Amino acid sequence: MKNTCSFLYFFILICILGSSACRSNDCADASLCIGVLIPERIFDGSYDSRRQAVVSAVEDINAAGGDIELVFGRDTDRSFDSDALGNLLDRGVDGIIGPTTSADSVNLVDDFVRARMVAISPSASSVEISTFADDGYFFRVIPSDAFQAPILAKLVKQAGGKRAAILFRDDSYGRNLKDGLVESLKQEGVSSLEPIEYGEGPEAAVNAVVNAVNAEDNPVDSIILALFREGGANFMASMLKRDELNGRVRYYGADSLSIEGFAEIVVALDPEVLSLEDMEGFVTTIAGPDPCRREDRKEVFDEAGRYARQIYDAVALMKLASIKSASSDPAVYVGEMIGVSRDGTKCRTYAECAAFLTDGDSTNDNIDYYGFSGEIDFDANGDVTKAFYYVHTYDDMGGRPDPVLVDLEGNPVGECKAND
């Protein structure tokens, strides 16, 4: 069944990208045309399943009368620049889903403002984004790293960590998460080594961390990685091959490393030396759903991978704001983006929310879309104000058993207690 679904999604994606047997990408053919800044491939060259989440959302919404067309931007080495955005704008899009990274979001924010174009990122989590001078055009459906850093620090403390090393990428995501981790560790009473910038290869970073672990005075016992999967995998592989470190250090990864199959990626770098058992105990955090929605459409979202729920909600919110404003002009419907996400009649699907807006009964026109990623509730900065995190831990087979869902204070949450 899974393979059949994957084939179906791939076929739909081919159609959206412009097959002559399918609908055209002519934006004039749809009531809302959405440009997508999600890479086509991940670092190992395989298809980025996050595009699948956009396809799934549009398929559902169109089945409910949404009439959305998609146009996919062409990335360069898994990132997008002004030229890629300009191509989408030239094709007449009415909104943007993406970018997926904090670095691309920071680089493109001025372009969004100049174009008066609404953009919703499903995964750009840098704290810096909250202070964007974006004239209200940029939103994100993932919590800021201002929440993730304290959770990671609390996990280190709970495991008995005394001193931590932080490795970070020199970009908006890495720098700001690093700063938050330093402060959060301090608040938890855990000291930290001077953060280490991860460059082109792992050698310098590995040597610095190994020296810190072997230090006679106040040695490092915890390592937190604010890296992407390629750098994170190379670093982990290099560290795990150091037999003298076994049992002396715990590893933690931020959301960029919380991916299915990460253990296999690490082991594949040197399978003669490494095994899946070496990844046992590796802990990662990633934004998760509200406990009231974690089982909703779970099979679809698991198939589409990380941030699938956030991507789905981004599409739904954009279309609902367009309906509420009776316009596909981003300069017009942007005024309804916050409103459809909070403080109204709660609705849990696009179809239900759209029905409230179009049923002729004005009493339900003030809607509150409760998404698959949670309640959302945008603030004035376009940030979500309610969210939860999954905490994953690898077992001795390289698998990730059922994760623990925690609130923004890092406390485990139970089952849904909502009455509506």
Image (cartoon, grey):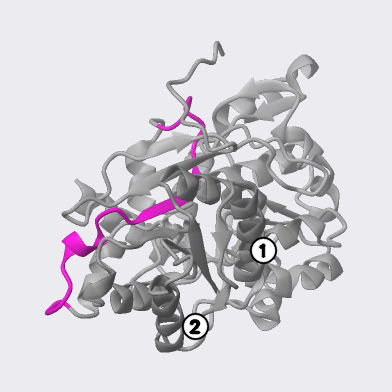
* First of labels 1, 2 by sequence position: 2
Q: Is residue 279 within the magenta segment?
A: yes
The numbered disc on residue 21 is none
Give coordinates of residue 338: x percent, y percent: 77, 39
Side of 271 where 78 appears, left or right: right
Would you name the residue on which mark 1 appears? Answer: 179
Identify the image quadrant of the C terminus: top right
Residue at image coords 44%, 48%: 56
SS at mark 2? Answer: loop
**Residue 143: image x %, image y %?**
62, 47
Rounded to the nearest angstrom, the CA distance separating label 1 from label 2 is 27 Å
Using the rendered image of the protein, determine whether residue 67 is visible from the camera's viewpoint.
no
Does dot 1 land on a helix, a strand or a loop?
Answer: helix
* Residue 272 quadrant: bottom left
Magenta-tinted stretch = 271-294
Q: Is residue 314 above or below residue 212?
A: above
Q: Is residue 374 left or right of residue 220?
A: right
Residue visible at 67% across and 74% down in the picture: 85
| Residue assigned mark 2 | 77
Magenta segment: does it hold 136? no
Relative vertical location of residue 321 with respect to residue 69 in this rendering, above or below: above
Of residues 3 and 280, the one drawn nearer to the viewer in this rendering:
280
Q: Amino acid at mark 2?
A: Asp
Task: Give the x, y percent position of residue 11.
Answer: 33, 61
Q: How many residues crowd mark 1 within 10 Å: few (<14), some (14–19), many (20+)?
A: some
Residue type, label 1? Asp
Q: Residue at position x 21%, y 54% from top?
A: 3
The answer to whether one can see residue 384 in this image is: yes
The residue depicted at 85 percent of the width and 49 percent of the height is 332
Across and down, in percent, residue 97 comes to 61, 58
Q: Residues within 10 Å of mark 2 (few under 14, many from 20)?
A: few
Left or right of 264: which side holds 303? Answer: right
